[in-house]
Image: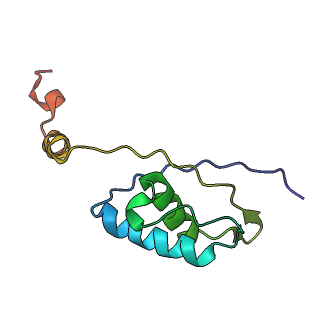
């Protein structure tokens, strides 16, 4: 048997419709709820964004892979002002090459 390999994957997920993501998570979590305790969310608006993302990713990424298994999914979500992303997008598209402009 080979040595164990530990991978850590980083994913950038851009959420365009947090309401739809929360609604989907609310329905998924409610359908899977098996505790004797009361379901912790009264509506989709009560589902925290990081919980909604964890739910969606957990549903999309299988627990078992051939010869491997994934661990718990951890999500750090932060809200970004759409005006901030517009200015970042314009900075990312700057295709000038400073090296080409310098004389050799």
Foreground residue, 91 or 50? Answer: 50
Q: Quadrant of the N terminus?
A: bottom right
Name the quadrant containing residue 30.
bottom right
Left or right of 18? Residue 85 is left
At a point 42% along the width and 46% down the height, the residue shown is: 77
Left or right of 82? Residue 68 is right
State how many labels appear. Answer: 0
Foreground residue, 53 or 62? Answer: 53
Q: How is the image coloured?
A: rainbow
At a point 65% along the width and 49% down the height, the residue shown is: 7
Q: Position of residue 96 (x, y in %)?
A: 12, 37
Q: Position of residue 91 (x, y in %)?
A: 16, 39
Q: Position of residue 65 (x, y in %)?
A: 70, 70
At a point 45% along the width and 54% down the height, the residue shown is: 48
Name the quadrant containing residue 19.
bottom left
Residue furthest out toward the right: 1
- Vertical comparison of 42 with 102: above or below: below
Left or right of 87? Residue 65 is right
Left or right of 33? Residue 20 is left
Foreground residue, 101 or 20? Answer: 20
Q: Quadrant of the C terminus?
A: top left
Q: Position of residue 83 (x, y in %)?
A: 14, 44
- Vertical comparison of 89 with 98: above or below: below
- Vertical comparison of 71 with 66: above or below: above
At a point 41% along the width and 66% down the height, the residue shown is: 44
């Amino acid at each position: 048997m080979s040595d164990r390999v530990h991978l850590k994957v980083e994913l950038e997920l851009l959420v365009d419709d947090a309401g739809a993501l929360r609604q989907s998570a609310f329905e998924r979590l409610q359908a899977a709820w098996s505790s004797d305790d009361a379901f912790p969310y009264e509506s989709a608006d009560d589902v925290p964004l990081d919980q909604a993302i964890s739910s969606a990713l957990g549903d999309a990424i299988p627990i078992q892979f051939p010869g491997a298994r994934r661990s718990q999914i951890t999500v750090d979500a932060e809200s970004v002002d759409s005006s901030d992303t517009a200015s970042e997008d314009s900075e990312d598209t700057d295709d000038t090459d400073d090296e080409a402009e310098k004389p050799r």
